[in-house]
Image (cartoon, helix red, strand yellow):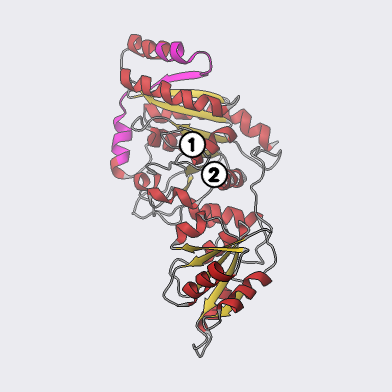
Amino acid sequence: MSQLALGLAVGARPWRGELHRHCRDHVVDVVATPVRDRRDAKTGTFDVLVVDDDISWLTGDLVADLHAGGVQIVGVFDPDEADGHGARHLERLGVRAVVGADAGAEEILSTVRALGPMTRWTAPAAHLHEAGTRHPVIAVGGPAGSGVTEASIALAAGVAPRAVLVDVDEVNPSIARRLGLAIHPHIVTAADAARREQVDLDGFAERSLVDCFARSAIDGPTAPFDVVCGFAAREDWTLVRPEEIVHLVGSLTGHGPVVTRIGPVLEPSVDGRGRFELSRAVVPVADRVVVVVDASPTGLLRGVDWLADLLPLVGDARIDVVANRGPSSRSAQRQVVDQLRRLVGDRIAEVHVVGHDRRVERAAWDGTVARTGRLRSVMRSIAADGWADTVEEFAA
C-alpha cells in the first residue's frame, strides 16, 4: 500500500492537531508531518500541504513553486467571516482546494484525497544552447577574497550585447551590495519566474523574468548590464534546487550573454543537496570559465586547490585565469604565470596578471562600475577573445 505524505502547516487553529492525531491513530496510509515555515514548505517531501489562509509565509510565489514541484495544496479558511475573505484570498494565491476550519478531520482528509495528481516540473536538459535562440554562459569564480566580485562586474561590463550578471554565490552574495542595488527581487524570485514561464499554471503569474532584474537603491549611474541579485540571506540557498538555477541560467541566455558569479567553494556534498551544489550545478553548463586567484604565494596555492575542485565539473570549456593584485615587475609576473602552469598544466588557456587597481577600489567605494583600468582592460580582452565567435555560433 502506497502512503500519502501530508504536510500540516503549524498555526493557531485546532484542526491541525485533530487531523494529526486522527492520521496517527486511525489512518494507515497517511503520514502527517508539521510544516513550520516557508523553508520547511520548500524543502519538505510531501504530496499535499494543508495550510491556513492566515499563515504569513503563504504567498503566491510559494504556491506556484509547490504546484510546479508536484505538491497539492489544501487551504483552510474561517467560515465565520461574513465576506468570505479567507476563501477568496486562498483562491487569489492559486490554491485549488479549500475547506472550512470547522471541518472535521475526516472531511479535511476527504478533500485531500479528492485532489488529482499533479505533473511534477522537471528542469530541461543541462545543454542550454539552441541555434538562433541562445547566447553563451561564462562562469566567474575563485577562492574567497581573490576579487571574484570585481572581476564578474568588469567582465559583464565588457561583454556585448548587453549581458546579464547572475549572483549564484551561496556563501557571500555581494553583487547587490557592491552596486547599490535593492536586494529584492533576487535569484529566488527569478527562479520562480523562469519556472512559471516554462510551466502552465492556469494563468497564474505575478512577474516575468525581466521583472526580476535588479533595481538601484541609490542615486547613481546605471550599470551597463542587467543583474539578478543573489540571496537576500545566506541561508536562503535552501529555497531553490540546483536544477532550478540551471533552468534560470538557460532562460536568461535568451536575453543576452550570461555571466554567473559562482561561490568560493566547490566541495562536493554526500547527497547532492549540500551547501555548494548551486555553484557546482552552474559550472557544467558554462561555455567558458574565468578563475580569479590572489597573486600571492598563499593565494596561488588556494587557487590551485579551487581549480582541483573545478576541473572535474567543467568538461571541455575554456578556462582563463586572472591572477589579481599581482606584482608590477615583468619578471615577477612571468614567475606567477609559470607557477600556475606548472601546478595546473595545459588545461589553462590564458593567464592574466593584474596589479593593484585604484580605479576598481574607487568604484567599489562609490558603488559604480570602473570604466577604465587594468582589470577592466583584461576582462574586456577575455570577453573579446573567443567570446564573439561563441556568440555568433549560437546566434546564427
Question: For this rendering, which residue is in front, 159 or 350?
Answer: 350
From this viewpoint, which residue is outermost toward the bottom?
82
Residue 56 showing in the rendered view: yes
Task: Please tell me whether residue 360 belongs to the stretch shown in magenta.
Answer: yes
Q: Is residue 248 above or below residue 83?
A: above
Q: Nearer the viewer, mark 1 or mark 2?
A: 1
User: What residue is shown at x 42% (from left), y 15% (from top)?
Assistant: 340
Q: Which residue is mark 1?
A: 269
Residue type, numbered disc 1: Ser
Q: Amino acid at mark 2?
A: Pro
Describe the element under mark 1 as helix, strand or loop. Answer: loop
**Which residue is painted at 53% across and 17% down in the image?**
347
**Residue 260 x/y as whole percent:** 50, 39
Above-or-below relation of 318 to 212:
above
How far apart are the two marked residues, 1 and 2, measured between alpha carbons?
13 Å
Check if mark 1's residue and mark 2's residue have beta carbons within 8 Å. no
Q: Nearer the viewer, residue 18 or 226?
A: 18
Q: Say whether residue 133 is magenta.
A: no
Horizontal side of residue 326 vs 257, given as left or right: left
For the C terminus, the quadrant is top right
Label number found at residue 242: 2
Q: Name the element at disc 2.
A: helix
Q: Is residue 296 among what the camera can see?
A: no
Image point (62%, 58%), residue name: 68
- Left or right placement of residue 267 versus residue 104 in this view: left
**Rendered residue at 31%/33% (across/down):** 359
Magenta range: 339-364
